[in-house]
């Protein structure tokens, strides 16, 4: 009888929100892809819904993938690796232990700062404080609503009319928490610093910043599944949920394997371009102000890359690629100054992997914003997405240096 009641209760309430997915003994492996056979196998693994989760995508033979494997799948995974002569390396032995360390420093209602990660509510409260405190130059905007009905909020920082504009969009991938933590630090610096470079950027550039773009996924990553990446819109005909919003923009959508059509894949491009309301809302918002935007930035983690168009091809390059490389070099040099952290720069398709339907490429191709960069922040895989909160400040300091250099070089080359 007791058992019956328990089962009915579970059936009625489903899985409680208080109950978080655990990643005990989930291990992240670096897997080297050295031939076509291995590539086929890794492609297959990356779309399996249970037991495998792709952390760092790959771009063919000669690259490597980071794959999280559940304890249940470990022996099958080991045999598969051995049978096919894969070179592998353990990056993270037990993902749950990193999540536990992170949540011990996670203070839901803590005063805002950069020593722990914050929930969406706390970030939005902080934004309200900023809007009130700096009302002379900060105004709020909303680009639209997420699938689950949350407002996707942003702020505009503008000291005078007629400035060129820079758009920053952050945390489209839910589990990349370092990105919103970094952008709030950046906003704070931009508003409060007396440093000449930052004052100059505050006074002579209009900033449009969305600190948490994938709001549904972000909340879900806090409350239910720390490793969630995609949107939260169900996919008709599939048990897997959500699309990769950063593969859902209508620019070379789904071309060249730069997104997957399998709804269970982390890089599922959606059933059609702009199927995700979040992607459509951002596209519409930028379309309305496109003449005001000179530079478009998207913050991600991890891997330590600075990536410019194109994403959809490994070989095709934009006509202003020489300029973009100069800008990338300036930013990477500046990023390395505080702590020696090395970023690799270049086009997404040539230095990292083919990724089609990204926001940066859409802005570049369809909205004529000719300086577009994706930042892939710390680290190289030691902690991956579960970057300890002690990295927030140093990562953010590096990002500030990178953006300053990027702006100065873009200006020198005539883009601002
Ligand atoms: C994780 O692995 C260790 C060592 O094999 C084992 O003792 C422990 O019970 C495992 N934990 C869980 C929750 O499976
Ligand atoms: Zn990302």
Image (tube, rainbow, N blue to C red):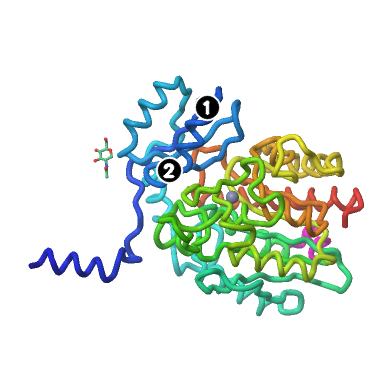
- Judge from the rendering whether residue 405 lies leftward or rightward of residue 51; answer left or right: right
Q: In which quadrant of the rendered view does residue 138 lie?
A: bottom right
Query: Residue 185: percent from the left, percent from the top?
Result: 63, 60
Residue pictured at 43% horizontal, 31% vertical: 90
Q: Is residue 218 visible in the rendered structure shown here?
A: no
Relative to 192, does residue 404 appear above or below in the rendering?
above
Q: In which quadrant of the rendered view does residue 350 lie?
A: top right
Relative to 192, does residue 382 appear above or below in the rendering?
above
- Judge from the rendering whether residue 235 lies leftward or rightward of residue 143; answer left or right: left
* Residue 48 - label: 2
Q: Earlier in the sequence, mark 1 or mark 2?
A: 1
Question: Mark 1–mark 2 contact, CB under 8 Å?
Answer: no
Please provide the residue range marked out in magenta.
Answer: 193-202
Q: From the image, which quarter does the C terminus lie in?
A: bottom right
Residue pictured at 68% horizontal, 76% vertical: 140
* Circle 1 residue: 32
- Judge from the rendering whether residue 237 lies leftward or rightward of residue 285; answer left or right: left
Q: Is residue 107 visible in the rendered structure shown here?
A: yes
């Amino acid at each position: 009888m007791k058992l019956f009641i328990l089962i009915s209760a579970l059936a009625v309430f489903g899985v409680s929100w208080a109950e978080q997915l655990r990643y005990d003994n989930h291990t992240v492996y670096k897997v080297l892809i050295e031939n076509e056979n291995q590539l086929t196998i890794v492609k297959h693994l990356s779309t399996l819904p249970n037991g495998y989760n792709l952390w760092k995508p790959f771009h063919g033979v000669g690259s490597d993938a980071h794959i999280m494997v559940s304890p249940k799948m470990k022996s099958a995974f080991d045999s598969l690796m051995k049978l096919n002569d894969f070179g592998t390396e353990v990056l993270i032995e037990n993902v749950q232990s990193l999540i536990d360390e992170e949540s011990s420093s996670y203070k839901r209602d803590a005063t805002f700062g950069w020593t722990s990660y914050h929930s969406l509510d706390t970030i939005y409260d902080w934004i309200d404080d900023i809007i009130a405190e700096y009302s002379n130059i900060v105004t709020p905007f909303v680009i639209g609503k997420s699938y689950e009905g949350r407002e996707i909020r942003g702020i505009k920082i503008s000291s005078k009319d007629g400035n060129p504009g820079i758009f920053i969009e952050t945390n489209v991938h839910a589990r990349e928490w370092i990105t919103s933590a970094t952008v709030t630090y950046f906003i704070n610096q931009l508003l409060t610093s007396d440093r000449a470079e930052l004052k100059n950027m505050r006074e002579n550039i209009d900033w449009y910043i969305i600190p948490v773009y994938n709001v549904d996924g972000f909340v879900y990553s806090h409350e239910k599944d720390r490793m969630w990446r995609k949107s939260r819109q169900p996919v008709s005909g599939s048990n897997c949920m959500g699309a990769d919003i950063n593969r859902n923009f209508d620019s070379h959508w789904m071309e060249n394997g730069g997104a997957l059509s399998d709804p269970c894949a982390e890089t599922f491009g959606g059933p059609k371009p702009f199927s995700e309301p979040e992607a459509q809302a951002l596209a519409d918002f930028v379309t309305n102000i496109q003449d005001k935007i000179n530079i478009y930035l998207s913050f991600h983690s991890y891997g330590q890359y600075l990536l410019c168009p194109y994403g959809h091809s490994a070989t095709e390059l934009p006509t202003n690629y020489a300029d973009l490389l100069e800008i990338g070099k300036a930013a990477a040099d500046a990023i390395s100054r505080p702590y020696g952290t090395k970023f690799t720069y270049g086009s997404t398709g040539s230095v990292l992997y083919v990724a089609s339907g990204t926001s940066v490429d859409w802005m570049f191709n369809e909205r004529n914003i000719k300086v577009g960069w994706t930042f892939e922040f710390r680290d190289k895989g030691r902690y991956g997405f579960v970057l300890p909160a002690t990295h927030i400040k140093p990562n953010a300091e590096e990002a500030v240096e990178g953006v300053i250099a990027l702006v100065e070089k873009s200006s020198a080359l005539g883009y601002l």
